[in-house]
Image: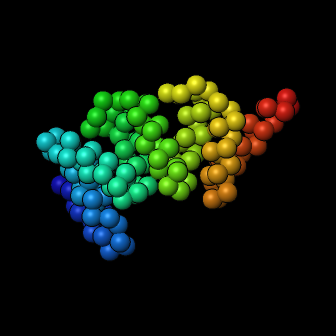
């Protein structure tokens, strides 16, 4: 019962701050503990991410696929959604994408790309990303 109340308050709060209807419906379906809503949640979030360019929806889809929530775990699909969120300006997604490229998860390891994503997140104020960008810079320079 507490989860339903939390989700209702969260959805109401997001609505007050102008979140997209598709995202709100997808978010509600995502956190609804009724498994018949799983497909609906993924569909609504996908539409919000791609059609409405909602970075939060794209990030949540990345989480769903990376953790296997509502969908089978699929790191390549997770990376796709995280990259979409990052390209839409989501700082947290930029950090996550940087880690994917740094570790070589779901993609071939690419330190240049990792550094680029970390630098983008750092420009938005993420200190972990700033430290990682500096670390990669030093590593590539042979320190």
The residue drawn where x is 47% and y is 47% is: 84
Residue in the picture at 62% in, 27% down: 109
Q: Is residue 133 left or right of residue 95?
A: right
Of residues 132 and 78, the one nearer the viewer is 78
Residue 114 drawn at (x, y percent): 64, 38
Residue 102: quarter of image = top right
9 on left or right of 52 = left
Task: Name the residue located 52 percent from the left edge and 49 percent from the top edge.
Answer: 86
Residue 39 horizontal side relative to residue 101, left or right: left
- Provide residue 52's location: percent of width, then percent of height: 36, 59
Residue occupying the far bottom of the picture: 16
Residue 8 visible (yes or no): yes
Quarter of the view holding residue 123:
bottom right
Residue at 40% across, 49% down: 58
Q: Quadrant of the C terminus?
A: top right
| Percent coordinates x, y for residue 77 in the rendering | 40, 34
Query: In the picture, residue 48 is in which quadrant?
Result: bottom left
So how many labels did they put on this image? Answer: 0
In depth, the one of 140 and 84 nearer the eye is 84
The answer to whether any part of residue 14 appears in the image is no
């Amino acid at each position: 019962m507490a989860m339903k109340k939390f989700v209702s308050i969260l959805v109401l709060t997001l609505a007050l701050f102008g979140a997209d209807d598709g995202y709100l419906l997808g978010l509600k379906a995502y956190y609804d503990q009724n498994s018949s809503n799983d497909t609906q949640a993924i569909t609504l979030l996908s539409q919000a991410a791609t059609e409405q360019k909602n970075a939060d929806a794209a990030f949540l889809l990345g989480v769903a696929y990376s953790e296997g929530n509502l969908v089978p775990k699929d790191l390549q699909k997770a990376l796709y959604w995280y990259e979409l969120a990052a390209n839409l300006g989501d700082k947290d997604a930029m950090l996550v994408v940087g880690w994917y490229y740094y570790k070589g998860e779901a993609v071939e390891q690419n330190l240049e790309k990792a550094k680029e994503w970390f630098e983008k997140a750092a420009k938005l104020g993420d200190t972990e990303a700033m430290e990682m960008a500096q670390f990669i810079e030093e590593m590539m320079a042979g320190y």
